Image: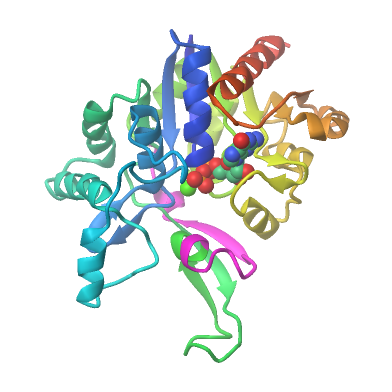
């Protein structure tokens, strides 16, 4: 079975670990979000690709969900001693090595997809990980900074890089718009459309619907490719009990006019894209609304508390995919 998964960072990576346990013989292609990518200290950092690679490769910091296990921060401290920032993005020493290798290869002319493949040679994630595009796409968030006089730009409306909104500002001000800068001109990376066209099933893990999966779908050709592939497309809700399980997805959903409920997210993807949708058992009451929108819906436990629970979620998604196949 060939499975294509569109993945962000933590939610996508953890789900993929369960999927690998549930379908050990499946051929899994992961299309990773690169809208979160950022240049720091002259290095290209791809947080979501790395979270998937480290999680599936056994190098992730389990508690945090991102970054490397057994990490130290000497390099960051030394940079700070020179007064070189930013200081709000946590890059550890081990993690730095990944970004150095990546940047070196990109500077030598390799596309990001080839670089990602090379990095995965070390981590052996057990899936084929392809960035959504080799072209540069950066998610920006329009915000109005609080008018507290605390900084020179307070009260100003401006666009900030997604990482600045998420990590530095901790989504403390409303997101007024989300713009995947560069997406319109971008092309899917080699292998992306082919994997979609050859897939037996496409899964949307419980990743952020706006800044993870939404950004991937913004690359021209990907949404159309999925809709036209004629294969079951099944998603799992990242919203449980009307709130994101972790993170601040409600802030970016509000920016695109979508309420933070499992049903609203399904409607946001829409029946033109989504055939099946899993909501958590606490949201069982919303299944009717999802089905009324023309999307087959089941309520099952959706908390990725451990590997077995996550594998069970993946099994439910594959079962629902079989149910909607040809329906
Ligand atoms: P990010 O790039 O690291 O933010 O990760 P993703 O976009 O892949 O996933 C973030 C989403 O995962 C958040 O909106 C969370 O609500 C969701 N999430 C995290 N843990 C769980 C879980 O155990 N169950 C469900 N259903 N969603 C989860
Ligand atoms: Ca992310």
Q: Is residue 7 left or right of residue 94?
A: right
Q: Can residue 84 be seen in this view?
A: yes
Q: In which quarter of the image is residue 213?
A: top right
Give the answer, above or below, for where 133 lies relative to 225.
Answer: below
Residue 294, image x, y percentages: 80, 27
Give the answer, above or below, for where 188 lies relative to 168.
Answer: above
Residue 159, image x, y percentages: 50, 70
Magenta segment includes 307: no
Q: Can residue 212 be seen in this view?
A: no
Give the answer, above or below, for where 91 lies relative to 196.
Answer: below
Q: In which quarter of the image is residue 87?
A: bottom left
Q: Is residue 255 left or right of residue 40?
A: right
Residue at 43% x, 32% y is 31
Q: In which quarter of the image is residue 133?
A: top left
Magenta segment includes 186: yes
* Residues rendered magenta in the picture: 166-188
Residue at 56% x, 39% y is 207
Q: Give 308 or 157, whichever is nearer the viewer.
A: 308
Q: In this view, does 267 lie to the left or right of 13?
A: right
Tell me the quadrant of ligand 1.
top right
Residue most toward the left? 108
Residue at 43% x, 19% y is 28
Q: In this view, does 63 lie to the left or right of 271?
A: left
Residue 58, image x, y percentages: 35, 30
Display coloring: rainbow
Residue at 81% x, 35% y is 283
Give the answer, above or below, for where 317 lies relative to 139.
Answer: above
**Total tally of numbered discs in the picture:** 0
Residue 67, image x, y percentages: 36, 46
Q: Give 246 or 1, whichever is nearer the viewer.
A: 246
Question: The C terminus lies in which quarter of the figure?
Answer: top right
């Amino acid at each position: 079975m060939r499975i294509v998964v569109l993945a962000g960072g933590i939610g996508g990576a953890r789900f993929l670990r369960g999927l690998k346990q549930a379908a050990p013989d499946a051929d899994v292609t992961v299309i990773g979000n690169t809208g979160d990518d950022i240049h720091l200290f002259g290095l290209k950092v791809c947080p979501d690709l790395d979270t998937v690679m480290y999680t599936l490769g056994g190098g992730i910091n389990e508690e945090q969900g991102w970054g490397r296990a057994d990490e130290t921060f000497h390099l960051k401290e030394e940079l700070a001693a020179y007064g070189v920032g930013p200081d709000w993005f946590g890059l550890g020493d081990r993690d730095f090595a990944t970004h150095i290798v990546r940047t070196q290869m990109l500077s030598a002319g390799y596309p990001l997809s080839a670089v990602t493949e090379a990095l995965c040679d070390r981590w052996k994630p057990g899936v084929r990980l392809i960035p959504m595009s080799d072209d540069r796409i950066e998610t920006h968030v329009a915000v109005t900074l609080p008018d507290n006089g605390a900084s020179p730009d307070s009260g100003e409306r401006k666009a900030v890089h997604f990482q600045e909104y998420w990590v530095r500002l901790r989504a403390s001000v409303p997101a007024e718009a989300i713009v995947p800068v560069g997406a319109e001109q971008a092309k899917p990376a080699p292998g992306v459309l082919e994997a979609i066209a050859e897939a037996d099933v496409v899964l949307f893990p419980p990743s952020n619907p706006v800044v993870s999966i939404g950004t991937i779908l913004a690359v021209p050709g990907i949404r159309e490719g999925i809709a036209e592939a004629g294969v079951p497309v099944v998603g799992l809700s990242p919203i449980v009990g009307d709130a994101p399980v972790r993170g601040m997805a409600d802030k970016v959903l509000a920016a695109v006019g979508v309420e933070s409920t499992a049903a609203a997210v399904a409607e946001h993807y829409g029946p033109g894209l989504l055939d099946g949708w899993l909501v958590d058992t606490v949201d069982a009451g919303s299944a009717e609304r999802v089905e009324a929108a023309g999307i087959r819906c089941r309520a099952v436990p959706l908390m990725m508390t451990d590997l077995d629970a996550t594998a069970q979620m993946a099994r439910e998604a594959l079962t629902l995919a079989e149910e909607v196949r040809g329906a």
